Amino acid sequence: MKVFMAERHLPGITMQQLGEAQAAAIRESDRASASGTPVHYLRSMYVPGDERCSCLFEAESADDVRHVNDAAGVPYTRVVEALDLRPPSA
């Protein structure tokens, strides 16, 4: 599977709302996977000063990630393929 990044602009979001949005994205990823469309939520990074959030998902396509986020009701500005660069294991 590929990694995709959902970019979000979330002006005025509270930490509680951010947590709820994350939970919704995870829940809908699990539902999609259980229904035969594998989508796995990986992690998110939020930049409070910019009111921007980037969420990483593993999926077969950007459309699958868009569908999950639409179902979760979590807005995004775009979904693009990304490289998840992790440090080498020791």
Image: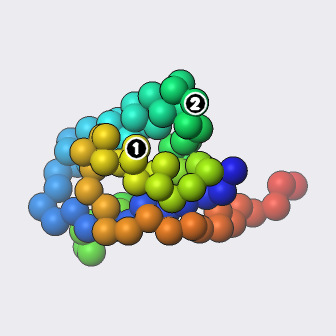
Identify which residue is drawn at 49% across, 49% down.
64
Identify which residue is drawn at 64% across, 63% down.
84
Q: Which residue is mark 2?
A: 36
Quick one: label 1, few (<14), some, or many (20+) residues within 10 Å?
many
Q: Position of residue 87 (x, y in %)?
A: 75, 63
Residue depth check, mark 2 versus mark 1: number of the one nearer the observer: 2
Q: Amino acid at mark 2?
A: Gly
Query: Is residue 71 toward the left or the right of residue 17 in the image?
Result: right
Q: Amino acid at mark 1?
A: Val
Quick one: label 2, few (<14), some, or many (20+) residues within 10 Å?
few
Does 76 appear above or below 49?
A: above
> Furthest residue to the bottom?
50
Q: Position of residue 78 (x, y in %)?
A: 38, 68
The secondary structure type at the circle numbered 2 is loop
The secondary structure type at the circle numbered 1 is helix
Q: Which residue is mark 1?
A: 68
Q: Position of residue 17 (x, y in %)?
A: 20, 45
The mark that comes first in sequence, 2 or 1, is: 2
Identify which residue is drawn at 71% across, 61% down.
86
